[in-house]
Image (cartoon, rainbow, N blue to C red):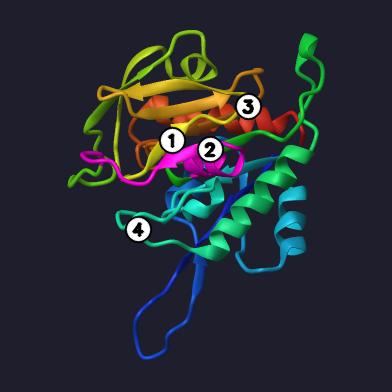
Amino acid sequence: MRPIIAVLCSTTHPTGATIQTRDSAGRPYSEAICRAGGVPVLVPLGDDEVAVRTVVSLAHGLLVTGGVDIAPGAYDEATLPECGEIDPLRDLADRWALQEALSRPLPSAGSAGTLAGMPLLGICRGIQSLAAFLGGSLYQDIPNHRQAEARNVPTQEVVVEEGTLLAGIVGAGALSVNTFHHQAVRRVPSGFRVSARAADGTIEGIEAADGAFRLGVQWHPEDLAADFAPHQALFDAFVQAAGGAA
């Protein structure tokens, strides 16, 4: 059985004669998951907690995708003028999905026993969700981290820490990435550690300190995965980890 990956959607508002709110996720997420041998299933938004939790409970891994800003109330801060667009339904879905995923048993982790929670991969907003909804906090606005170049063009280097789960996947040291964010992790939640930073010190990667596959990256590897092996390797490792529960 191929592992099922629950993929969180974002809200879009198409323009035209008929205005219809849509739940969507960029196709590169699904393509990278499929190349890795997984089966992507979209998690619809809405205020139905049971619906969100049910879809996640049927999956073997959870991908927390990119999107608009997280409401600062999630980490007990007032909203600054620099904070951008928020999506209350997406915030609810992220919170419920993470709670559900972390309540599920992971596949056996050898001598470490069984760790709590299914494998998680957070991308861009997704790493911020891991921080905001698990007890950390965010910078609401930082400069110089939004490139003008196409999404499949790496323009920035991050340094991956030796001895981390991320280093075991993409290699330690310098990694070329893309960058499309103006918020970033400020305080890492309890039980997590930093796995990568940009040259200016901005946190670009966090992961569970206990070795479980709970990993967040600030860049968009899905847009690089078709052309750059280290970025596809993130999805390969994620789907492989989820496969232990399939």
Distance, label 4 to label 3, CA atoms, is 30 Å
Residue at point 57% right, 53% down?
A: 8
Return the x and y of residue 172 as percentages of the image width and height: 40, 12
Q: Which residue is mark 3?
A: 213
Distance, label 2 to label 1, CA atoms, is 6 Å
Q: Which secondary structure lies at badge 3?
A: loop
Residue 104 position by quadrant: top right
Q: Are marks 4 and 3 in contact (CB under 8 Å)?
A: no
Label 1: few (<14), some or many (≥20) within 10 Å?
Answer: many
User: Range of the magenta residues?
Assistant: 126-145
| First-in-chain label (4 vs 3) | 4
Question: What amino acid is at disc 3?
Answer: Phe
User: Is residue 139 highlighted in magenta?
Assistant: yes
Q: Residue furthest bottom?
A: 17
Q: Mark number for residue 84?
A: 4
| First-in-chain label (2 vs 3) | 2
Q: Mark number for residue 47?
A: none
Q: Which residue is mark 1?
A: 185
Distance, label 2 to label 3, CA atoms, is 15 Å
| First-in-chain label (2 vs 1) | 2
Q: Are marks 2 and 1 in contact (CB under 8 Å)?
A: yes
Q: Which residue is mark 2?
A: 131
Location of the C terminus by quadrant is: top right
